Amino acid sequence: MDQSKIRNVAIIAHVDHGKTTLVDQLFQQSGMFRENQEVAERLMDSMDLEKERGITITAKNGSYCFKDYWINIIDTPGHADFGGQVERVLRMADGCLLLVDAQEGPMPQTYFVLKKALAAGLRIIVVINKIDKPAARCEWVVDQVFDLFVKLEAPDHLLDFPVVYASAKQGYAKHHLTDESTDMVPISELIATHVPPPSGDPNAPLQMQVSSLDHSPYLGRLGIGKVVNGTLSINKPIAVVKRDGSISPARLTKIFRFESDKKVSTDTAGVGELVAVAGMDDVTVGVTFTDADNPMPMPLIEIDPPTISMNFIPNDSPFAGLEGKFVTSRHLEDRLRKETLADVALRVEPMKEGVGYVVAGRGELHLSILIEKMRREGFELQVTRPQVIMKQVDGVTLEPYEELTIDVDEQYAGAVIERLGMLRGQMQEMTQANGMNRLVYKIPTRGLLGYRSEFMTATKGLGMMNYVFAEYGPYAGDIINRVNGVLISMDTCTTVAYALFNLQDRGRLFLGPGNRIYAGQIIGENARNQDMVVNPAKGKKLTNMRASGSDENVVLVPPVQMSLEDCIAYINDDELVEVTPKTIRLRKRSLNVK
Ligand SMILES: Nc1nc2c(ncn2[C@@H]2O[C@H](COP(=O)(O)OP(=O)(O)OP(=O)(O)O)[C@@H](O)[C@H]2O)c(=O)[nH]1
Ligand SMILES: [Mg+2]
C-alpha cells in the first residue's frame, strides 16, 4: 500500500455527539456497500449491548476509500468510563475528527479527548455536527471550541484548525454554513489534505505496538495497532517486547487489515497500516512486535488506574443455581480473569475476607456492563455497593473528585442545587441562557454514585448531566446514600396481590404479585427511615365473604422498575444485588429476619 496515500484518523467526541453515525455515512457514501444492501444503523456498534443502549463501548477500526486515499477510521467511545481507550487508540492515528454537537457545544468529555489529542500532537479537524437541529448555534459553538483550544494551550499551528459543518444523520457536510451540499465529501477532502500520511521508515527495523485488543472465536486474542516502522510479515520471525520489558521470539499466525467494517487477511503490512494480529495468546495493550535481530520497544502505554470497585460474590441466596449455568466461585474467577485479559482497565483480586473478588474499574457503567455481559452468558452472582478507591498520601486520606456539568431547566435548578449540596458538591459556576441553567460543580465521586437516575427523575428527564474525573482531594466527610429503609420479606413465599395492596401505603414496592421471593429479600422501599420486615404473602381471611373472588379486584400501584444500574446504586453496605440470567433481586446480606 502506498504510504503517502494512507490516512489514519480517530473520531473523538463527547458521548452521543454522533461519532458512530458519522462513520456510517462515510462508509455508505464511499460506495463500499451494494446499492440495495441492507446496512445496519450505527454499523460499528456491533456488540449487542452497544446496539441496545445506543452507545459505543469499545473502540473499533474500519476503513474506506476516497479517491486514491485509503482512510483508516477509528471510532471511539464517548462515555467517560471508557476514556482510557481513547487515549490508547490515538496512538494509531495521525489526525482526528473532533465532533462537537451544534447545539450543546463542547462538553466535559470533549475537553478530555481534545486534551489527549493535543498531547499526542495530532492534527485536528473540528466537525460541528447535528447542524440540522433547530436549536443549532454553530458560531457560538465554534467560539467555544476555540476557547477550549486556548484553555488547553494548543500550539499556534493547531489553533488554526479547519472547521466543517455536518449533519451525520442526514449525510451532508459543508465548509461554510451557506454552502449547498448533499454529501460528506468535504470531510473526506479535509482528511486527505489536512491529516499527514504516516511518517514511519519502511527500511527501519519493525515496530508495531498493540493499542487495543479484539477477540476471534477461531483465533483467540488479536492485538490491534499501527505498523510504525518497517514491514510486518507473516513468514518472518519477529520478537515481542512485553510490558515488563522482557523480549521473546514470536510468530504471528495471521495478519488482518481493516476493510470497511471487516477484517481481511493479508501476508504483509507496511508502514502506517493498521492491523490486527493473531498468534500470541497473552497479547496485551502496550506490547511491541519488533525486529528479532534489532529489537526496538516503543514507550509504554500508561493505563489509568481504576477509580471504583465492587465485590463480586458467588450467589449464595436460597435461589442460587435455579436460573443460571455458572454459579460457583471457580466459574466467577475464570470469567473475571478472562475479562482482565481483554480489558486492561479492569483489576481483579480475591477478597481479603470471605469468598469473592474485588473488581475495580473506571466507573459504574464500566462495571455494570461487565455484570450485564456475564448474566447474558449464564452467570449468577451477587454484587456489593460500589466503593470509590481512596488514596493515602502522607498519612492523609484522599478521595476522587469529579467535575460535574449540569444543564437544567430553571424550574428544577433549585432542587438540584439543594441535593448536590447534600452530596458534598461545591458549586464552581452558574450561568443562565434561554431558561436553562448551567451548573458546574466539583463533587466527590462518591456523591455521584447512583445520582444519575435520581437526577433524571428530579428534572423529569429534561436535564443533562456529565462528569469527568478532576483530581484526588481531601475526604469530604460522610455522604448518606439513602435515607429510607426497605421492606423485607419475612418468608420464602409467592407474593400475593392482596398483601401487596396492604403494603403499598407503607412505601414503594419493587415487585408485583405472583413473584417467588425468599426471606430476607427486599421487596420495596419503606417510607420511613428504618427497615421493616413484612409478609407479602398474607391472603384474605377465609371468613371474609368477598375473599372467594380472591385477589382479582385489588388495584395495585405499578411496581417501581429498577435497572441493574439503579439497583447497584440503590443498595447500602449491608445489602446485595443478586443477578441471574433471568432476574435481578435486592437482598439483605443477612437473611436472618426472624
Ligand atoms: N439531529 C441529528 N442527530 C444526530 C446526528 N448525528 C447523530 N445523531 C443522533 O445522535 C445520537 C447519538 O449518535 P451516535 O452516532 O451513537 O453518537 P456517538 O458519538 O457514537 O455516541 P457514543 O459512541 O456513545 O459516544 C443518535 O440518536 C443519532 O441518531 C445529526 O447530524 N443530527
Ligand atoms: Mg458511538
Image (tube, rainbow, N blue to C red):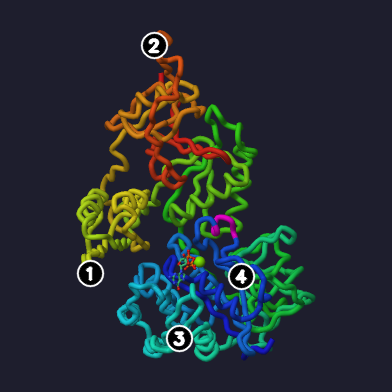
Q: Residue 174: which numbered mark, if any?
A: 3
Reading the image, the residue beneath label 2 is 544
Q: CB at mark 1 closer than 8 A to ligand 1? A: no
- Give the quadrant of residue 138: bottom left
Mark 2: amino acid:
Asn
Reading the image, the residue beneath label 1 is 433
The segment highlighted magenta reads 47-51
Q: Is residue 21 left or right of residue 400?
A: right
Q: Are marks 2 and 4 in contact (CB under 8 Å)?
A: no
Q: Nearer the viewer, mark 2 or mark 3?
A: 2
The picture places residue 556, in percent across and down from the top left corner, at: 39, 31
Mark 3 or mark 4: whose residue is earlier in sequence: 3
Callout 1 crowding tier (Cα within 10 Å): few <14, some 14–19, many ≥20: few
Residue in front for this viewpoint, 105 or 241: 105
Q: Nearer the viewer, mark 4 or mark 1?
A: 1
Image position of 440 with respect to 453: above or below: below
Callout 2 crowding tier (Cα within 10 Å): few <14, some 14–19, many ≥20: few
Q: Nearer the viewer, mark 2 or mark 1?
A: 2
The picture places residue 153, in percent across and down from the top left corner, at: 34, 81
Callout 3 crowding tier (Cα within 10 Å): few <14, some 14–19, many ≥20: many
Examine the rendering and report whether any part of residue 468 can be seen: yes
Residue in front for this viewpoint, 35 or 46: 35
Reading the image, the residue beneath label 4 is 210
Q: Are marks 2 and 3 in contact (CB under 8 Å)?
A: no
Mark 3: amino acid:
Lys
Mark 4: secondary structure: strand
Q: Report how far apart the C-alphas of labels 3 and 4 lie in the structure.
A: 35 Å
Q: Report how far apart the C-alphas of labels 2 and 3 lie in the structure.
A: 76 Å
Look at 71% across and 66% down and name the residue there.
278
